[in-house]
Amino acid sequence: MARVLLIEDDPAVQKGVSLALGRRGHDVEVAARGETGLLALERYRPDLVLLDLMLPQMSGLEVCRRIRESKQVPIIILSARGDEIDMVVGLEAGADDYITKPAGGAIIEARMKAVLRRVAPAQDAQEAIPPAGAEHYGDLTVDRTTLVVTKHGAELALAPSELKLLLFLTAAPGQVYSRQQLLEQVWEYVFYGDVRLVDACVMRLRAKIENHPRRPVYVQTVRGFGYRFGPVE
């Protein structure tokens, strides 16, 4: 069971999603506006946030950005906007996934479970790797035991997807992975999903760990193939 904060102003969607997830054993708290959603986030302490984009006054994108300023709670955007640009902007704002409405309870729950598995830190990703304490890559330190990533000694606030992607890539520095491979291994999508999730997450991760995101040293693009970590000199 997950504690879900649904930030959504449409009463019909509020009712439908709450009923669908409630029947599946989840506990759902509803906030009709962005401002009340941010307050509920502190009080309710959800495992995951379902966030509409088209909210009155404070937009869903602004809510997403404010949450990401201090929280690593997983965020799934649940929006009627299905255009590519809306999806990219939402993911770049810090969301971990994007679902286009209308969506059934089974789909929402499946995507929730996939995102929540990522939070469990990369427990799966670490299973095959003996705990070795902190690993140092240039100015970057990745501690697989505490799941803390620091740069120049300062801890970085990485969202669950960003952390798991970094842990996965650093588990095999130099190994090239296609976007589809990363989607399956990190996002755990067994079907052919939207690889823009990968690109958006890489962009956010670079903004936090690279000195020059346009000239990345850590997460590098291998043109025509995908991404790799390093090599870092």
Image (cartoon, grey):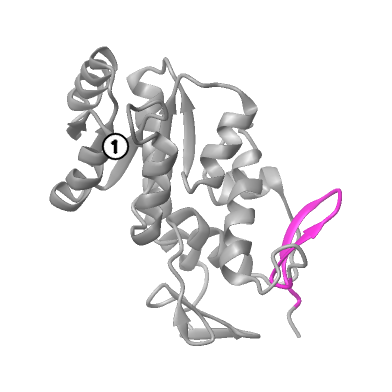
Is 174 displayed left or right of 90 in the figure?
A: right
Q: Which quadrant of the rendered structure holds the C terminus?
A: bottom right
Q: Residue furthest front?
A: 57
Rendered position, 156 above or below 83: below
Q: Nearer the viewer, residue 211 or 186?
A: 211
Boundaries of the magenta span: 217-231
Which amino acid is tagged 1? Gly
Q: Nearer the viewer, residue 219 or 180?
A: 219
- Tell me residue 11's x, y (percent): 23, 16
Which residue was labeled with disc 1?
34
- Tell me residue 5's x, y (percent): 24, 38
Q: Residue furthest top?
A: 12
**Would you identify the image quadrant in which residue 75 lies?**
top left
Rendered position, 145 above or below 157: below
Rendered position, 169 above or below 118: below
Q: Residue visible at 36% across and 22% down?
A: 106
Magenta residue check for 104: no
Q: Residue visible at 61% across and 47% down?
A: 200
**Label 1 secondary element:** helix
Q: Residue visible at 36% across and 43% down?
A: 63
Q: Which quadrant of the rendered structure holds the N terminus?
A: top left
- Tell me residue 114's x, y (percent): 43, 41
- Tell me residue 8's x, y (percent): 29, 27
Residue 4 in view of the camera: no
Residue 39 in view of the camera: yes
Rendered position, 5 above or below 99: below
